[in-house]
Each structure stands twice: as C-alpha cells, then as structure tokens.
Image: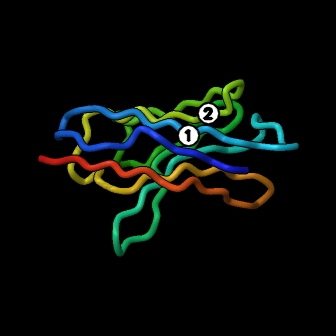
Amino acid sequence: VQLQASGGGSVQAGESLSLSCGASIRYIPISIIIMGWYRQTPGKQRELVASVTSAGDTNYADSVKDRFTISRDNAKKTVYLQMNSLKPEDTARYFCNAKYAGLDYWGQGTQVTVSS
C-alpha cells in the first residue's frame, strides 16, 4: 500500500483546508482498509485526527470534532479530510494512514500551518 497526501498549506485561524490521500494498492480491496489521518508536531507523538472504516463509521479526536470531516471514495481509492474553523493548535504535519491485517501504512505527510 502506497499513500500520497496532498492539500496542506498555510492559512489564517478560522479558515478551511482540505486534504486528500490517494492509495496505490495491489491485491487488496480498498474497501476493507481502514483509512485515516494522523498529525504530529516536533517533539510530540503522532496522534489520531480521524479515521473511517469501509462501512463509513468515523472516529474523531475530541479536539477536531464538529470542525473536521473525514470521508472516503473507494472507487477513487482516496480519503479526504475537510478541516474547517482551523486553529493555531491544528498546526502540524498531517499523515495519511491505512490499516490492514494488523499493519500500518503511512504517506509522506503534508504540512498544515495555521496562524493567528
């Protein structure tokens, strides 16, 4: 599984950004893979932002609930993260993640910077 994320950038607090992550997968149906977004800042552990199962069940970090929305398009093998009402504390490098058979696959990450 190879993941390619895009869509990061620099915005002002209160603005929005959308991230997308395309998956290159062989031999594994995309529909059975849990996909999600994590973020990490220097010196801190990577933390879950949001995830979505093949059934469309979502899970969000408390800090982003009601502001971020994760979705997936299995036909396009892509997962999206819509981020609204961004805050300076959302500044981090965001990583796309795919989980399958007990393994984690990671994209290269995309930087999101929110200034006050």
Q: Extreme bottom residue here?
A: 43
Alpha carbons under labels 1 and 2: distance apart: 5 Å
Quarter where residue 83 is shown: top left
Secondary structure of the residue carrying tag 2 is strand
Q: Is residue 51 left or right of residue 23?
A: left
Relative image position of residue 13 (x, y in whole percent) = 17, 40
Scheme of colours in the image: rainbow
Q: Which residue is drawn at 63% across and 26% down?
A: 73
Mark 1 element type: strand
In-front residue for pair 32/17: 17
Q: Where is residue 85 in the image (x, y as percent from the top left)?
A: 25, 34
Q: Residue tagged by mark 1?
A: 21
On screen, residue 13 above or below 44: above
Residue at point 55% right, 30% down? 71
Q: How crowded is mark 1: few (under 14 residues within 10 Å), some or many (20 or more)?
A: many
For label 2, the residue is 78
Tell how many labels: 2
Of the pair 64 and 87, the residue shown nearer to us: 87
Please indicate whether residue 28 sits to the left or right of residue 21 in the image. Answer: right
Label 1 with label 2: CB-CB less than 8 Å: yes
Q: How crowded is mark 2: few (under 14 residues within 10 Å), some or many (20 or more)?
A: some
Residue 38 located left or right of residue 34: left
x and y, in percent, of residue 4 in the image: 57, 45
Residue most toward the left? 116
User: What residue is rendered at 66% in x and 39% in y?
Assistant: 53
Residue at 61%, 38% in the rendered image: 22
Residue type pointed to by label 2: Thr
Percent across and percent down for residue 28 are: 84, 43
Amino acid type of the residue tagged 1 in the rendering: Cys
